[in-house]
Image (spheres, grey):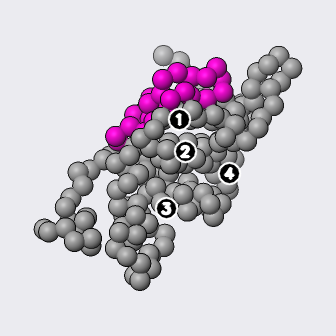
Amino acid sequence: MFVGAPLAAPYPIKERPMSHLHIDDFTHDVARILMQCYMSFPRPVALYVEDIVGPTEVDDVGLHSTRHMSCLGAMLWLADEGYLRYQATIFQEGLEQAVLTNRAFVLLTALSDLRFEETDPQLPATVRLEKATLAEQIIHAIRAQDSSRTTALVRYLLSRNPQPVGKEEFAPIGAKL
């Protein structure tokens, strides 16, 4: 056991008024990755990093940028955590035959307790139910380029466990309770 003065940080630690940018990038990558798989579900697709983060340059020795590798890392992390499956990596370019798992599908299509906007009561019940899902809210946040909302929705999704869908969820469209 070491006895003596506590180790000092090699650099001063300051409070940062902004969030960690790599976490923001991660949540945005996760949103886009899941939505690409959702939009083609149940058909497996090839997921390319370039489709998520845009084109990136390789350096002089052929290594991809940190941003590129972080996005690939997000894809692999989603697979490790049970949100998607894939057949193989495509070198360091993406994933081959990627598809949502049951867990991800249920979470994305479930009615969300987290809602940023109320749906128009004039819409048919089926449309109102669809707009209340996490998938629709994430799609809307991405299209609106709303970074805070995208991050909040992804963090909410990743903190959830799938729950059985209760029959009362379908009461607005005529299900008998």
Q: Amino acid at mark 1?
A: Val
Q: Residue drawn 53% across and 18% down?
A: 2
Q: Position of residue 49 (x, y in %)?
A: 65, 35
Q: Evaluate if marks 2 and 4 touch, with contact meaning CB atoms under 8 Å apart.
A: no
Q: Position of residue 47 (x, y in %)?
A: 58, 35
Q: Nearer the viewer, mark 3 or mark 1?
A: 1
Mark sitting earlier along the chain (2/1): 2
Q: Evaluate if marks 3 and 2 touch, with contact meaning CB atoms under 8 Å apart.
A: no
The residue beneath circle 3 is 137
Extent of the magenta region: 80-103
Nearer to the camera, 126 or 65: 126
Q: Tell me if I can see residue 148 in this picture.
A: no
Instruction: Decide: few, some or many residues near mark 4? Use Cα within 10 Å; few <14, some 14-19, many ≥20.
Output: few
Which residue is farthest right? 60
The residue beneath circle 2 is 36
Q: Does the magenta run of residues contain 88? A: yes
Q: Nearer the viewer, mark 2 or mark 4?
A: 2
The residue beneath circle 4 is 16
Question: Of the numbered discs in the image, which one, if any, rests on residue 23?
Answer: none
Question: Of the numbered discs in the image, which one, if any, rests on residue 45?
Answer: 1
Q: Amino acid at mark 3?
A: Gln
Q: CA distance from mark 4 to mark 1?
A: 39 Å
Identify the element where label 2 is drawn.
helix
Task: Tell me: 103 left or right of 143.
Answer: left
Identify the element where label 3 is drawn.
helix
Task: Tell me: 14 left or right of 115.
Answer: right
